[in-house]
Amino acid sequence: MADAPATGQPAAEAPATGQPAADAPIPQALCSAPMGAAVTVGERCVCGCRAKGAHGVGRPGPRHAGPATPTEPAAPGGPATPGGTGRAVGAYPLVVDAGAGTGRHLAAVLAALPDAVGLALDVSKPALRRAARAHPRAAAALADTWRRLPLADGSVAVLLDVFAPRNGAEFRRVLHPAGVLLVVTPAEDHLAELVDALGLLKVDPDKADRVAGSLADHFDQAAESVLRARLELTAPEVATLVGMGPSARHTDPAVLAARIAALPEPVGVTLAVRLGVYRPR
C-alpha cells in the first residue's frame, strides 16, 4: 500500500486512456454475477463473452451460465504469491478490492502483478465509474460487502480490504484455498496530529483485536506489520482527508472548517496503518 502512486493512477505501462489492451485477460470467474450486477472493464463484458456494452456501471447485464472454476487449481498448501498466484488460481489470477472506492489501491496492486486482473467492489456508483478506469486490467462491480458478493466460490487469489467492512464468511467463500486476504486498518497513531488539533475521533486501541476476532472463524492470521509515513499537507488536503473519514459525520462542518483554517501550513501528519495477512482455514 505504501508504494501506491501519489496520483492514484496506474503504472506507466498502462494506456493513458484507461481502456484495456486488446489482449487484456478477462476474469472468467465473474460469469456467476447475478442479474443486475454492474460490471465493466472499459466497454467489455468481464464474464468472458467479450460483448461490448453487455455490462455497465449501474446497468443490469445478462445472466450467464454459472460459476467458473479455477483452470489450474493449486497443489495443497500452494502459496498465492506474486510469482505463484497464477499457478495457484488459474491462468489469470483475480485480485478483488472490497470497498475499493475509486480503485487506487487496486491499481497499485495490479501494477505489481502483471499477470493478474482486478475487480473493484463498492456501493458507490460514482466511485465505481472511476475504479473501472483506474487500471486497464481493472473491472468494477456494484456490491454491498455485507451481502453475497458477485463472485464464484474460490475464484479470488488476493482479496484486499482497506479501511472497509469485513465480511469473514463471504470473504472465505470467494477466496481460493491458496489465496490471501490483506486487511488494512488504522494504527493507534494514525493522523494523530489532526486528531488532537481538530478534535477528531480516535482509533479504538482494541481495533486490531476486534479485526482479528471478526475473521477468526474463517481465517488464520499469518503476519502483521505496521507501516508509517510522514505527510506534509495543505489545508485543502487536510479537509479532503478528514472528509473521507468518520469524523466528518460527527463534527460540525463550520467548526471543523475553522479549525482547519487555523492550522499552520504545511501540516505535518503521521500516516500509520496496520496490515494484516490472513490465510483461509
Image (cartoon, rainbow, N blue to C red):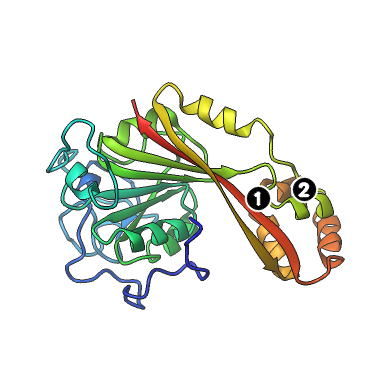
Relative side of 142 to 136, left or right = right
The amino acid pointed to by label 2 is Leu
Q: Which residue lies furthest to the top in this view?
A: 217
Residue, disc 2 = 200
Q: Residues within 10 Å of mark 2 (few under 14, many from 20)?
A: many
* Mark drawn on residue 245: 1
The residue closer to the viewer here, 164 or 74, is 74
SS at circle 1:
loop
Q: Is residue 61 above or below residue 258?
A: above
Which residue is at 15% across, 38% downward? 73
Q: In which quarter of the image is residue 15?
A: bottom left
- The answer to whether mark 2 and mark 1 are in CB contact below 8 A is yes
* Distance between the alpha carbons at the discs numbered 2 and 1: 9 Å
**Residue 160 percent coordinates (x, y):** 42, 46
Q: In this view, does 124 lie above or below 232?
A: above
The residue closer to the viewer here, 32 or 174, is 174
**Residue 281 percent coordinates (x, y):** 33, 25
The amino acid pointed to by label 1 is Gly
**Residue 192 percent coordinates (x, y):** 74, 50
Among numbered discs 2 and 1, the one appearing first in the sequence: 2
SS at circle 2:
loop
The residue closer to the viewer here, 134 or 85, is 85
